Amino acid sequence: MAGGLFALLDDVAALARMAAASIDDVAAATGKATAKAAGVVIDDAAVTPQYVRGLAAERELPIIKRIAIGSLRNKLLIILPIALLLSQFLPWLLTPLLMVGGCYLSYEAVHKIWGAVFGHGDHHEAADEHPRDEEAVVSGAVRTDLILSAEIMVIALNTIAGEGFWSRLVILAVVAVVITVVVYGVVGLIVKMDDIGLKIAETSSGFTHKVGRGLVRGMPHVMSVLSVVGTAAMLWVGGHILLVGIDELGSPLYDAVHHGEEAVSDIAGVGGVLAWIVNTLASAALGLVVGAIIVAAQLGITRLLAKRSATA
């Protein structure tokens, strides 16, 4: 009887160890998948604050909350089922879908650069010139989030493609929740940071008062830096997706980049960093070229349609 009880306890302990190992595996895979999508996450965090510019301060957090809920619905109810079905029955579609997403990210980055250089502005900022309805703001933000979230989830899915179906389901669901909480938590902090600084400046003195005033003055610069970082991240991630995708399609381009990495990887002390820089610069360059081609094509089509409309 005692022997049977000890055997049962051993079985329970073994099952507990297996469960713990599975949780660790899921956690590790979730972390890896989230890290791979970091570039898109940065852009998501950079884009969203633009939607609450010009709105009443007391409505900023409620609107961000509504956008966050919409983002979570996008990920869990729309993107996750479609991504799992594709990975289960049409896995060969993942690389082309990733490459389409890479083209989109590259286009978005070059579009922002074009607007900054030639003064056309970002399409997210165009609505700032007119009073905006909250429903329109939320629906527009959720539509944009659908594209960015789809890219995040497909990148994450591609990272864990070798996992079993249920593991993929759990990992992607965790990625969806974690990324949504992190992105919109950061966004909420960003958009309220100037209000926090103002409150500190009004209710304190000395060094703390200076910190509050510094927050108020510094937030516009933080937003500008965040926008630049988001654009750079899109070029890097979009270009890297395309680089890996065309390698899988048989192009020798990635081999050339890999040779460049190998050429600097043996330099003592800094080889690993230099290899990463080579890959990053090559990815960003490819993203810049592809994005420029798409922007040029868009501008050409727009001008052609405008001419036809003028002559009609």
Image (cartoon, rainbow, N blue to C red):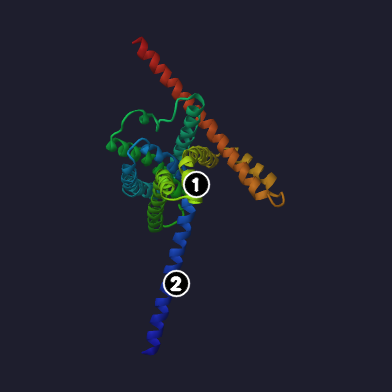
Residue hosting label 2: 17
**Image x and y of residue 290, in percent:** 52, 31
In terms of image quadrants, where is residue 56? top left
State the quadrant of the C terminus: top left
Q: How many discs appear?
A: 2
Q: Nearer the viewer, residue 8 or 24?
A: 24
Q: Residue at x 45, y 49 (%)?
A: 156
Q: Is residue 77 above or below residue 131?
A: below
Q: Residue at x 69, y 45 (%)?
A: 264
Q: CA distance from mark 1 to mark 2?
A: 53 Å
Circle 1 Cα neighbour tier, 10 Å, few/some/many (<14 / 14–19 / ≥20): some
Q: Nearer the viewer, residue 244 or 124?
A: 124
Whether pointer 1 and pointer 2 mark residues with C-beta atoms closer than 8 Å, the reply is no
**Image x and y of residue 233, in percent:** 51, 41
Residue 97 disc label: none
Residue 210 disc label: 1
